[in-house]
Image (cartoon, rainbow, N blue to C red):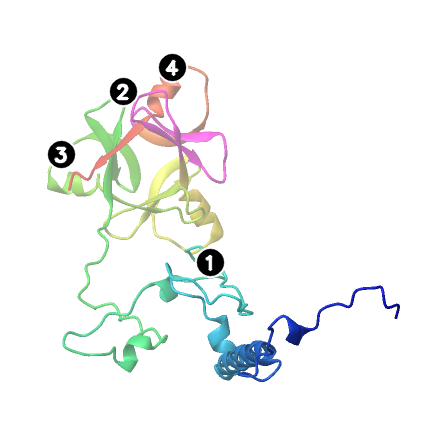
Amino acid sequence: MPENQPRPPQPWENGWVPDTSRAPGTRRLYLAGAMAVATIIACVTAIAWTDRGPEALSQPSPAGTATQPGLLSFGTPAQPEVTPPKGKSGLTTDEATTPAPHQQGSASPSPAAHSTTKPPASQPSSSAPKPATTWRSVRSVNYPDRYWHVSGGYVKLDPVGGSESREDSTFKLVKGLADSTCYSFATDDGQYLRHRSFVLVANRNDGSPLFRQDATFCPRPSSAPGAIMLESVNYPGRFLRHQNFQLKLDPYQYNDMYRQDSAFRLVAGLA
């Protein structure tokens, strides 16, 4: 070194003395220790949450509380509640939606309440009232004081007489022997009104198809209010009418006299 260049001052020349009170690198040791402690705390926390199982992780937090920061929940999201439609279908039944009745004082319903077996239907009582028999009398429209009346086996249009005449003017109205949508008229002694040779008579039922057809008459609308016309089943187009006060079966005629003679009203039985 040249002699004329100044020499830098040495540390011991300006009064500086090295610090010997702590070991070299102490600050780095403190920083490393703090990082180690933080790592241990994080590991312990992770192990604790792992031990709680997936159920704890999947449980949703209560309303109004915050979840743990930094932790993700992998639980299945709750499905929206679906209410099946009511009614008898493949989804629900009346029996499923109707709660079983509880007995008073019982903590739980009895096993019989959950039974799906229906009790046997009760047998009808022999004392149950039977349907009332329909008894009717047939009144003429153009002769309102005259009714169908069985006399000597023939059906005539006669005025009301005594009790015997009233019984012979009252008939049991039943379903048609040949057609249930039509009418048949039975007498009190079990005979039926039928047409024979196109004249209305009272005869015993012989069980033949011809008798059933002869004794069946279908109601048709009439031009008179509240009245009907009675058409033969086996002779369509022929209607019962009175002529000279005798009941007979005649083809329809387009005149007022025929329409009035063939119009009748079914009224309450006279007997």
* Residue identifier under label 2: 142
Between residues 201 and 7, which one lies in front from this camera angle?
7
**In the image, 59: left or right of 103?**
right
Q: Magenta stretch: residue 135 in it?
A: no
Tell me the mark number nearer the camera, choosing from 2 and 3: 2
**In the image, 158: left or right of 76?**
left
Magenta highlight range = 219-245
Tell me: residue 180, above or below residue 218: below
* Residue identifier under label 4: 256
Tell me the mark number nearer the camera, choosing from 1 and 4: 1
Distance between the Cα atoms at labels 4 and 3? 29 Å
Q: Residue furthest top?
A: 256
Distance between the Cα atoms at labels 2 and 3? 19 Å
Q: Work out whether mark 2 precedes mark 1 in sequence or the reverse, and give the earlier one.
A: 1
Q: Work out whether mark 2 precedes mark 4 in sequence or the reverse, and give the earlier one.
A: 2
Marks 4/3 in contact by CB < 8 Å: the verdict is: no
Dividing the picture into quarters, in which one does residue 155 lie?
top left
The number of numbered discs placed on residues in the rendered structure image is 4
Distance between the Cα atoms at labels 2 and 4? 11 Å
Question: What is the three-letter code of the residue carrying label 3?
Answer: Gly
Marks 2/3 in contact by CB < 8 Å: the verdict is: no
Question: What is the three-letter code of the residue carrying label 1?
Answer: Val
Q: In the rendering, at what x and y percent does residue 122 appear?
A: 26, 71
Distance between the Cα atoms at labels 1 and 4? 71 Å
Q: Work out whether mark 1 precedes mark 3 in sequence or the reverse, and give the earlier one.
A: 1
Q: Which mark is residue 161?
A: 3
> Which type of secondary structure does the marked residue at label 1 adopt?
loop
Question: What is the three-letter code of the residue carrying label 4?
Answer: Asp
* Residue identifier under label 1: 82
